[in-house]
Image (cartoon, grey):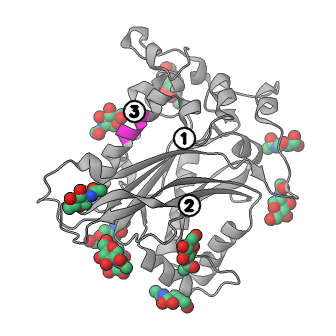
Amino acid sequence: MQSSTISYLTILALTSQVLFLPSHANLCTNIDDFNNYNASHTYSMPALRINGTKRDDEGFNIVEDPDSSWYIASRLKVSRVVDDGSMNNLWLNTGSSNTTNMGMCEESTSSYELGEYKFSKEVLERSVNDNGDCKTMLGEECVEALRVHYTESAIYAMRKGQCPSGSDWNITVPQQCRGLVGGGEHWLGGMSAIDKGISLNATLQQQLYNESNCDTSLNASMHSAGGLGGSYNQSIRFPQPTFLTFWPNRTDMSRYLSSWDDDVYVKIVCLRPDEVTEGSVVPPSGQELLDRPDAKFNKNTTQGPSNPSDGVVENVCGKKF
Ligand SMILES: *[C@@H]1O[C@H](CO)[C@@H](O)[C@H](O)[C@H]1NC(C)=O
Ligand SMILES: *[C@@H]1O[C@H](CO)[C@@H](O)[C@H](O)[C@H]1NC(C)=O
Ligand SMILES: *[C@@H]1O[C@H](CO)[C@@H](O)[C@H](O)[C@H]1NC(C)=O
Ligand SMILES: *[C@@H]1O[C@H](CO)[C@@H](O)[C@H](O)[C@H]1NC(C)=O
Ligand SMILES: *[C@@H]1O[C@H](CO)[C@@H](O)[C@H](O)[C@H]1NC(C)=O
Ligand SMILES: *[C@@H]1O[C@H](CO)[C@@H](O)[C@H](O)[C@H]1NC(C)=O
Ligand SMILES: *[C@@H]1O[C@H](CO)[C@@H](O)[C@H](O)[C@H]1NC(C)=O
Ligand SMILES: *[C@@H]1O[C@H](CO)[C@@H](O)[C@H](O)[C@H]1NC(C)=O
Ligand SMILES: *[C@@H]1O[C@H](CO)[C@@H](O)[C@H](O)[C@H]1NC(C)=O
Ligand SMILES: *[C@@H]1O[C@H](CO)[C@@H](O)[C@H](O)[C@H]1NC(C)=O
């Protein structure tokens, strides 16, 4: 778990470096990942904007823009960078929104890694019916607890002007989700993140794409958010729970008075690029993969909570272990 989490961090760091220190070759590869892929799925979310214009003002907060939508695209491509075959890249299309001074952080966990499933068979069986909001896969209580958890994380980023890095990331799983991880404190599939996060500063992105000279162009409102490596078959069939936070990049936190919770925005999305492009290999169904005699499940997925009287059993997101 540890080593593959580190390698994912490395891959993401490379990708985000492409955004900030572009070389023509890297940027073109990046754009190619958007245009050429083997499987995909696109999810919509409310468009966001910053309410207010002064960066040092407490009214400088993130609000939904009811008139438009943003799109999160999960695009999977066969890759030799990782041993077992694919990268699931996340792209965010912010349309015509003004994203100047808006920051975004991203964390993801895997459902399958290094030859074994990181959730129980029952959780993965229901995960194929998840519509992207993670509620079917992880359960409503767990998703609500994650929303609270990531609101804290977004506030932390807002106060620092950047995403947590290294040991600053809080990778503890909320109590309400512990039944999914055998009562442990961490996701069994590890937690991966882009160190220092992503600036959604549209102008910055547009300038980078303008400076590049690739065959294909990319709409300036597209933001690359890195990718998670994994096995081709399983990455197409099982969701990758992903936690996105959006926050206003203020300058002066000291004057700030009202409720921070309302100033940031959390989007929880279970990415499952299940729409296979024409000509690409169609993997076996999720059920077929899970029913294979050689399917391996992390041993902790079937373990009960360490202390059955601590209330975890009642809160295990619809599943009793
Ligand atoms: C975009 O928002 C920023 C504040 O975040 C503001 O200063 C700027 O004027 C806005 N740009 C446009 C084109 O509205
Ligand atoms: C936008 O900011 C103004 C002034 O700070 C505030 O009165 C208003 O409620 C805010 N709107 C939203 C949707 O938060
Ligand atoms: C990018 O696409 C969005 C809609 O998806 C559109 O509103 C915007 O104008 C486009 N931007 C550019 C620079 O083409
Ligand atoms: C880390 O997250 C857990 C679960 O949400 C929470 O209980 C804990 O208080 C957080 N720790 C810090 C230092 O914020
Ligand atoms: C936030 O603003 C600071 C400068 O005030 C800048 O250094 C930092 O990169 C910005 N963060 C993002 C995510 O845009
Ligand atoms: C974000 O964009 C604004 C407006 O173009 C610019 O003044 C600012 O320096 C940018 N911030 C970062 C962190 O790049
Ligand atoms: C990027 O290119 C477009 C079209 O060529 C141009 O309108 C825009 O001003 C350029 N933006 C930057 C930041 O260079
Ligand atoms: C994916 O499924 C195909 C078709 O069933 C199979 O041939 C292949 O070995 C599988 N790949 C992996 C990495 O499990
Ligand atoms: C993935 O897509 C490429 C074209 O983009 C195709 O050449 C390749 O055969 C596909 N791989 C699989 C495993 O379907
Ligand atoms: C699995 O459970 C054992 C025993 O409770 C524990 O020592 C180990 O750290 C757990 N592994 C993971 C990946 O959580």
Residue drawn at x 52%, y 60% as measured from the top left: 70
- Residue farthest right in this picture: 279
Q: Label 3: how many residues lie within 10 Å, few (<14), some (14-19) or many (20+)?
A: some
Q: Secondary structure at mark 3?
A: helix
Residue 240 vs residue 17, the one in the foreground: 240
**Nearest to viewer (mark 1 / mark 3):** 1
Instruction: Find residue 86 and report its horizontal and vertical position in percent.
Output: 72, 54
Mark 1 touches mark 3? (CB < 8 Å)? no
**Nearest to viewer (mark 3 / mark 2):** 3
**How far is the residue under mark 1 from the one under mark 3?**
14 Å
- Identified by mark 3, the residue type is Ala
**How far is the residue under mark 1 from the one under mark 2?**
20 Å
Instruction: Find residue 97 and report its horizontal and vertical position in percent.
Output: 44, 69
Badge 1 or badge 2: first in the primary sequence: 1
- The circle on residue 226 is 2
**Nearest to viewer (mark 1 / mark 2):** 1
166 relative to 13, above or below = above
**Is residue 76 in the magenta section?**
no
Q: Which secondary structure is most common in the magenta stretch?
A: helix
- The residue singled out by tag 3 in the image is 145
Q: Find the magenta span and give its range.
A: 144-149
- The residue singled out by tag 1 in the image is 133
- Identified by mark 1, the residue type is Asp
Residue 1 vs residue 262, the one in the foreground: 262
Residue 254, quarter of picture: bottom left
228 relative to 127, above or below = below
